Structures are given as structure tokens and as C-alpha cells.
Image (spheres, helix red, strand yellow):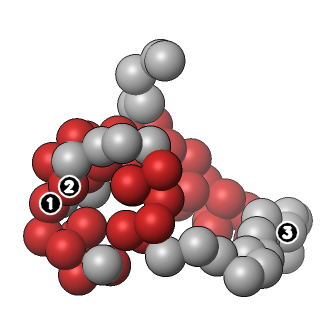
Amino acid sequence: MSERNISQEILDGFEEIRTFKSGKGKLKTSVLSDPSPAKEIRQKLQLSQSAFAGFMGVSIRTIQDWE
């Protein structure tokens, strides 16, 4: 698995918003249909909350809130 470059992802998002606001582009959207609960996904992957948080790039507290 490759390392995510969160800083670059944020910068890319800002650029996308700037382009959209200037009327020169469209925003990317995603539609989630019937998402599985976070705990179910985490358990299927056999990960602890800590490991799942690291995998998702969020804090353990965020995982706890999702669950």
C-alpha cells in the first residue's frame, strides 16, 4: 500500500474549488449507496480501532464516533 499525501490532496481540493467557483470546472461528487457500518467493516478487516484509524487516516476518536 502506498503512503497518502494528505497535504497534496488538500491542495488539490482547494484548486478544484477555486476552478469551480470561477465557472471553469465541475466538482467531483460521490454517491454512497447503503454503506456498511464502520464497525462491521473494521471487524471484517480484522483491525483494531487504532489500526483502522491509521488505515483510514483519521483519529481513533473519529472511529469511535462512527461506531
Q: CA distance from mark 1 to mark 3?
A: 33 Å
- Give the image quarter of residue 32: bottom right
Q: CA distance from mark 2 to mark 3?
A: 36 Å
Q: Nearer the viewer, mark 1 or mark 2?
A: 2
The mark found on residue 26 in the picture is 3
In the depicted view, which residue is nearer to us: 62 or 44? 44
Q: Amino acid at mark 3?
A: Lys
Q: CA distance from mark 1 to mark 2?
A: 6 Å
The mark found on residue 49 in the picture is 2
Quarter occupied by the C terminus: bottom left
Q: Amino acid at mark 1?
A: Ile
Q: Are marks 2 and 3 in contact (CB under 8 Å)?
A: no
**Could you tell me if residue 28 is visible in this image?**
yes
Left or right: residue 15 versus residue 32 is left
- Residue at 48% x, 59% y is 41
Q: Amino acid at mark 2?
A: Gln
User: What residue is shown with label 1?
Assistant: 60
When the figure is inspected, residue 47 is found, relative to residue 2, above or below; the finding is: below
- State which tag comes first along the sequence, 1 or 2: 2
* Image coordinates for residue 30, horizontal then vertical, percent: 76, 70
Q: Identify the element where label 3 is drawn.
A: loop
